[in-house]
Amino acid sequence: MKIHEYQAKSLLAKHGMAIPRGEMAFNPEDIALAAEKLGGQTWVVKAQIHAGGRGKAGGVKVCKTKDALEKEGRNILGMTLVSPQTGPQGRVVKKVLVEEGLDIKKELYFSMLVDRSNKSLVALASTEGGMEIEEVAANHPDKIIREEADPVLGFRPFQGARLAYRLGLDKIDPKLVRAMSGLLLSAYRVFTEEDASMIEINPLVITKNNQLLALDAKITLDDNALFRHPDNVAFRDLDEEETLEVEAADAGLNYIRLEGNIGCMVNGAGLAMATMDMIQAHGGKPANFLDVGGTADQKRVETAFRIITKDPNVKCILINIFGGIVRCDLVAEGVVAAFKNLHMGIPVVVRLEGTNADKALTIIQQAGLSGKLIQAQGLKEAAEKSVHAASGQ
Ligand code: GDP
Ligand code: MN
């Protein structure tokens, strides 16, 4: 689960990391109040959306007067922010974070994630903060410094100190070595105690008076561990999630929306991936990933149909079910009933394989829906027929 910058910063602060002072604003009136509370001469107003690249897109503004802050804040609240990470449709900004403005001496990069090949947690740091780390990784891989956590002991204080020396922080101020050491341990506590799967602080800044602070923060929490953190569940922001995905999750379906026009209904994640590959290999584009799970009964098929067809791009649906434990004839009955119940207006290609597949075939043939409910044998034929049906020819 992704969370907002202000929420991520609250977790960092909870585990001892220094962050700028800030106040949230949910409507224009809150902005002046926030400046009042914070005091000072400079403020930064930051759009809170689940995507980075806000700075370049106009979602982060440094303001030197209260008037400027109110003007920029009003402008950002409600704007549709389009950054390389939001997709072309952008995101509507519903809240902003107002922070004290800091005098920045240096911007660094810091992150912590799981290195699967190494079976360990890894901390990455770079002197090239503020920019996209992918760019640094591609052009100056030597500028990314790594520290790996011991699986039993975790990160140890000397590793933070070593990061600081390798980043040259001791030359700016020797006390930054200890600060960096503390920061690494704080990040490790956030990672393990909050069950995070990724922490990124870009930029991590050194201010003019040599304070080390997390100026930006992005944290992803592990969905599978959320039950252990009732406080963190409250971080969920449904405004930031795809509505169809939320609806599908509530129905217990594994659904991810994509950009194509062929809806997919498949049992099993592996088969769903193979189905999407097959569609692609035949020149089509899947509109979604959908794993209906082990019980492809009429109710689930209906729910899945309903969710898939809410996406206006869908021109055809491909049902690919392998009957291992499920019986294909029952699935076929469910498909026919759901098809009739929902008055499906688009063609549906059905490929059923496994237990009672022959009975299923008879059920589909006798349903009297020829032209609309298209039966296919084998995945290849199913892909071909759905690509053809989606093209509308
Ligand atoms: P992102 O573009 O979504 O990653 O948003 P960031 O939080 O990283 O902000 C983008 C940039 O705004 C930072 O890299 C800083 O250069 C600048 N910025 C953010 N807060 C401050 C601040 O308090 N003072 C100054 N001078 N610059 C800031
Ligand atoms: Mn950033």
Image: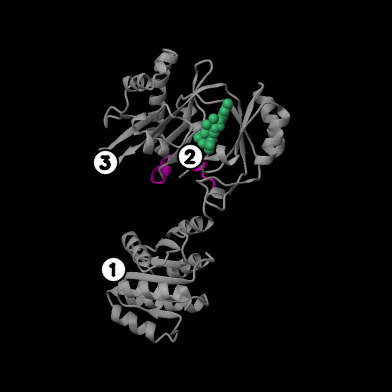
Which residue does the numbered mark 3 point to in the structure image?
117
Question: Mark number for residue 325?
Answer: 1
Q: Of marks 1 and 3, which one's residue comes earlier in the chain? A: 3
What residue is drawn where x is 45% and y is 78%?
337
Near mark 1 (Cα within 10 A), the count class, few <14, some 14-19 or many ≥20, is few
Quadrant where the N terminus sits is top left
Per the model, the C-alpha gap separating discs 1 and 3 is 35 Å
Pointer 1 and pointer 2: residues touching (CB < 8 Å)?
no
Give above or below for 13 relative to 91.
above
What residue is drawn where x is 64% and y is 45%?
79
Give above or below for 125 relative to 254.
above
Q: Residue 351 versus residue 86: which sits nearer the camera?
A: 86
- Callout 1 amino acid: Ile
Per the model, the C-alpha gap separating discs 3 and 2 is 29 Å
- Callout 3 amino acid: Ser
Residue at the extreme front of the image, as rendered: 139
**Residue 331 coordinates in the image, percent (x, y):** 37, 74
Q: Is the residue indicated by label 1 positioned so its CB lies within 8 Å of ligand 1?
A: no
Kind of element beneath mark 2: helix
Near mark 3 (Cα within 10 A), the count class, few <14, some 14-19 or many ≥20, is few
Kind of element beneath mark 1: loop
Nearest to viewer (mark 3 / mark 2) = 3
Q: Is 65 positioned to the left or the right of 4 in the image?
A: right
Identify the image's colour scheme: rainbow, by chain, secondary structure or one colour: one colour
**Residue 327 seen in the current view:** no
Question: Mark number for residue 335?
Answer: none
Which residue does the numbered mark 2 point to in the structure image?
232
Q: Of marks 3 and 2, which one's residue comes earlier in the chain? A: 3
Q: Is 88 positioned to the left or the right of 335 in the image?
A: right
What residue is drawn where x is 62% and y is 40%?
95
Magenta segment, which residues?
Answer: 223-237
